[in-house]
Image: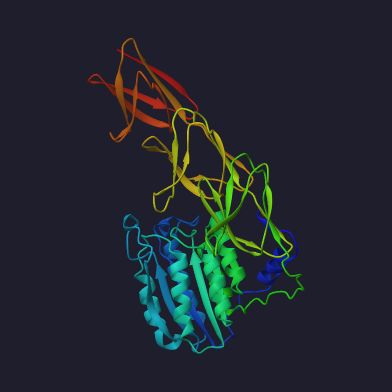
Amino acid sequence: MIRTTGMGTAVFGLLLSAAPYDASYAQTGRSIALVLDASGSMNAKLPDGATRIDAAKSAVADLVGRLPADTRLALRAYGHQSPTQHKNCQDTALLVGFDAVANNKSAVLAASRSIRAQGYTPITYALKLAAEDLGKENAATRVVVLVSDGKETCAGDPCATAKALADADAKLVVHTVGLGVDAAARFQLKCIASVARGLYTDAGSGGELMSALGRAAQAEAVQPKKEVVVAKTLGKIRIEGATAYTHDVIDAAAGQKITAISAVWPEREVPPGIYTVKFDNGKWQGVEVKPGETVVLKPGLLEIRGADLWGHKLLDPETSETIGQFVAHKTRIPLLPTRFLVTFSKAVWPELVEIREGATTKLNPGVLKVSSTKPFKATVNGDDGREIAEVSSAISRIALPPGRYTLEAAGQKFSVELKEGQDVEMKIP
């Protein structure tokens, strides 16, 4: 777990548990901007078999059926207009503008049903526009309810943005819901809610998402605990199990490096604020440091058998962009706890690789060794006929995911099946 020393986390947990799901939704006098994730990863299935986007659509229908008729509601989506290959970091739109639910219920339902999940996750940009939409509302409370199944995939820090927005508008509240998220996304979404007087809720199923939206729609703003803080009191960031690798610590608001953490200095003092800590597979965003408190980050470790044979790319599962590199001299590296794809030359490990906090994940590929009595050059093709890699007299060994392959050399084809952890040697003429 990622934790802060002091009472902040405990108080947050008590507030969350104290917000029961009330089907009557008694509050009025509020405007709610519902912001839905429609990025490509929302097509993944939940344990109950429904896709995440279908679960979100059902939760919207449940929500509008329960809200008081005079609640003003708007619907915004992001990631729904452009496929991932367009890399559109401004892919968000206000689908239904603010009006009393009695008037726009049908429009919200129709718009939500038409959403197609396909693009990036521009949380920062969508959050900024949702706050601008709300700023025009004359309401006692202005609420953003943000649903996401992942972390930011574009530029910007959504937690730093949420803090700036909340500081500028005392009536703004941002509640966040993580739908089947990994540890890094949960950390980011929790930070957004924490700095914007909101609550964070985990949802692992369609039913839990419905309940989460219900709690967020009725929850009051979380009032920060009043504490006497000595001026210039610093906080700390510590990486548990820090190794020789160096992790830059970036001030999220200024975008400037202020220090670095490694095994030599596993803990650093920093001014209160929001930070980003760099890892080989991405940025650990939303690190909120409070005066006199210590934030502890627990990276996971990835170990790949045969990593000395080839370098491996770490790919974002939603965008397919390279987010890190596992090079030949590194066989065990600390990583941001998230999910990603791992390449073996042009082959991809068959399942998403999840790095868990404080744990070691091991990949055990097969190793193919090719030998000949004379100089050679051969291609390795996947089961679909696509070229995966090349071997030769100079580089004759390669690590590959388990599967069936075809070796082509000197006009001849040789079939081979690799299993996890298996070494296979092939001799060709």
Can I make out residue 189 in this image? yes
- Return the x and y of residue 278 as percentages of the image width and height: 55, 50
- Return the x and y of residue 15 as percentages of the image width and height: 68, 72
Can I make out residue 61 in this image? no
Is residue 171 rendered to the left or right of residue 111?
right
Up/down of 396 relative to 106, above or below: above
- For this orientation, the residue located farthest to the left is 411
Q: Work out which quarter of the rendered image holds the C terminus and state it.
A: top left
x 43%, y 74%: residue:
129
x 67%, y 77%: residue:
223
Up/down of 229 relative to 383, above or below: below
- Return the x and y of residue 373 as percentages of the image width and height: 33, 9
Is residue 249 rendered to the left or right of residue 57?
right
- Return the x and y of residue 35 as percentages of the image width and height: 46, 72
Q: How many marks?
A: 0
Pick the front one: 412 or 320: 320
